[in-house]
Image (cartoon, rainbow, N blue to C red):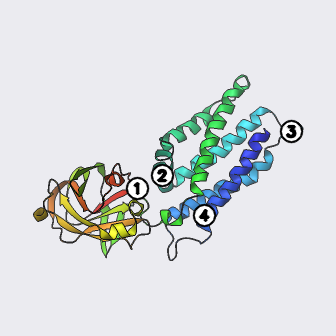
Amino acid sequence: ALDYRNRLENLLSLSSRAYLAVGSGGALSGEKTDLQEAFKNIIYQFAYHLSSTLDDYIVGKNAGHPITLVIFFKKLFRSLTTLLNLHPGLKDFLNERFFVKEMSSDVGRFMSMVDSFLLSDYNHNDLGGHIRSIDEILEQVRGIFGFLAQVKKEQLGAQAVATDTLTYHGQTYRVVEYGGNRTEQVGELIYLLIDITESRPMTDTVILLNKDLFDSARWMSMQVRLGLNEARGLGETDPVEIDVNTYGNKVALHPQDMVKTDSVNQLTLIFRGADDQSRLSNLSRMDLIVYSV
């Protein structure tokens, strides 16, 4: 029981540091994004819940029946999963950046594990089973807040996650669903192929890539072209403007001379000067976002 008390105190301290990681400056200079606000709200509400109930967790000779321990953790874990469900953008962010990349898992498994614990009836003869569930979930919760404590405000900037629409240079674009992406390399050229889920007409597009894939100098030294469907040659692809300034955590790729195409099922970005193919391989849906009109 004392071990749990210490772990909860540490979790509260970690939550405070996570809040300060984004909350200290209010937000990025000149902007407040939905993701930043969700981040601060979840950390604040969870820390508030934990701090206001921590003294209910009594250890030593005055400790209550073990069922009180189980109920305490059910309330704590339910508060976190409820907050995540209320902020789907941050839930997606955690899924891509923490669960998939750090844990080789996904947020759905974590939510199901918590739900299983919440729905289980207290069984004094299986107290060890309750303890194992608490340990497993608590370890992942600590991992979540440890990850959030290291998040930079820039990572929660505009377009950190996909939105239904994007306004860029005065034009409104709608998000495009894609089935997957893959890379090919031919000589010094790297091809990033994006499979569009349903063929669609396209007049213009903006493709956002994670800025951290390359440093600014490398981005600015690249040459990028865009091909639609099977197009790859110079005469059938469009030069692409590389915009590293508009978004704090994304690079915007915008074709300069694109003309309307009635049916597009694949976009191909052709990179010269990217050098490292692995950086463009297996991009997540937060690393790569496609918009079009």
Q: Secondary structure at mark 2?
A: helix
Which tag, 1 or 3, sits closer to the chain's start? Answer: 3
The amino acid type of the residue labelled 3 equals Gly
Left or right: 124 in relation to 189: right
Picture residue at 64% right of the left edge, 57% below the top: 45
Kind of residue at badge 1: Met
> Label 1 neighbourhood size at 10 Å, few (<14), some (14-19), many (20+)?
some
Question: Residues under labels 2 and 4: Cα distance?
Answer: 16 Å
The answer to whether the residue labelled 1 contacts the one labelled 4, judged by CB atoms less than 8 Å apart, is: no
Q: Quadrant of residue 259?
A: bottom left
Is label 1 in contact with label 2 (beta carbons under 8 Å)?
yes
Which of the labelled discs sits on residue 286, or is there none? Answer: 1
Nearest the eye: 145 or 244: 244
Name the residue type under label 2: Arg
Q: Position of residue 142 (x, y in %)?
A: 63, 47
In the rendering, which numbered label is found on residue 21? 4
Q: Earlier in the sequence, mark 4 or mark 3?
A: 4
Q: Residue at the top extreme?
A: 125
| Residue 60: mark | 3
What's the residue at 23%, 58% (across, down)? 188
Q: Position of residue 248 (x, y in %)?
A: 44, 69
SS state under label 3: helix
Q: Residues within 10 Å of mark 4 (few under 14, many from 20)?
A: some
Q: Secondary structure at mark 1?
A: loop
Q: Earlier in the sequence, mark 3 or mark 2?
A: 3
Earlier in the chain: of badge 1 and badge 4, it is 4
Real-space Cα distance between discs 3 and 2?
39 Å
Disc 1/disc 3 C-alpha distance (Å): 47 Å
Q: Nearer the viewer, mark 3 or mark 2?
A: 2
Quadrant placement of the C terminus:
bottom left
Q: Which residue is mark 2?
A: 97
Separation of marks 4 and 3 at Cα, in angstroms: 35 Å
